Amino acid sequence: MLEAYRQHVAERATQGIPPKPLNAEQVAGLIELLNKPPAGEADFLIDLLTNRVPPGVDEAAYVKAGFLSALAKSETTNNLINAEHAVRLLGNMLGGYNIETLVQLLDDESLAELAAEQLKGTLLMFDAFHDVAEKAKSGNSFAHSVLESWANAEWFTSREAVP
């Protein structure tokens, strides 16, 4: 997988264009490599997972979110990505397949605060907004903090000022 990807990057570079994002099959191969990383490739593998998988709701994002969700929920482990790192990576996916897990983690004693921080910057919630609202109504302080953050538009006001 790595050799083919590096060849793809080189071919695109000769054309002066960036590499295509990873597809679902490549992400599945990447996950296998993350579970048994070749020597000296750990940082590159994490960079690929972080930056070369499209956010949102395509098949590659589905595979990525499934892997990260399993790590975040401690259903599996990985020597390169712990549960906290998995939650941060889920937070960078902008919406889609990551949302269900982040909302569920609002009830996780050890990861709720981090999940809330990730959700505060996520706007593509769709129907999951109601799940966060229900948790807040039930007394979940982390869900309440997410709703307050959205109401105060912190996702916008926390950005650098436009020149």
Image: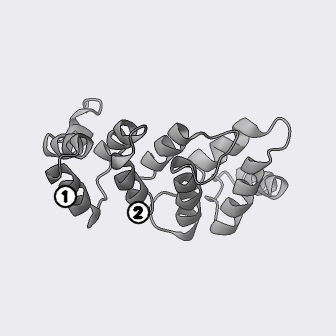
How crowded is the residue under tag 1: few (<14 C-alpha within 10 Å), some, or many (20+)? some
SS at circle 1: helix
Q: Position of residue 120 (x, y in %)?
A: 29, 43
Q: Position of residue 52 (x, y in %)?
A: 60, 51
Residue located 31% across and 44% down the image: 121
Residue located 19% across and 44% down the image: 144
Q: Is residue 106 left or right of residue 26?
A: left
Q: Which residue is mark 1?
A: 134
- Quadrant where the C terminus lies? top left
> Compared with residue 127, is residue 55 higher up or lower down, i.e. above or below?
above
Q: Position of residue 128 (x, y in %)?
A: 28, 62
Q: Is residue 146 left or right of residue 106?
A: left
Q: Position of residue 77 (x, y in %)?
A: 65, 47
Q: Nearer the viewer, residue 114 or 94?
A: 114
> Compared with residue 161, is residue 20 higher up or lower down, i.e. above or below?
below
Earlier-in-chain disc, 1 versus 2: 2
Q: Amino acid at mark 2?
A: Gly
Q: Is residue 56 left or right of residue 78?
A: left
Q: Is residue 69 visible?
A: yes
Residue located 70% across and 39% down the image: 79
SS at circle 2: loop
- Quadrant where the N terminus lies? bottom right
Q: Which residue is mark 2?
A: 96
Question: Do the CB atoms of the residues marked 1 and 2 lie less than 8 Å apart?
Answer: no
Find residue 90 and name its label: none
**Which quarter of the picture shows residue 27?**
bottom right
Residue located 64% across and 60% down the image: 22
Q: Amino acid at mark 1?
A: Glu
* Residue depth check, mark 1 versus mark 2: number of the one nearer the observer: 1
Q: Nearer the viewer, residue 145 or 74?
A: 74
How crowded is the residue under tag 2: few (<14 C-alpha within 10 Å), some, or many (20+)? many
Way the structure is coloured:
one colour
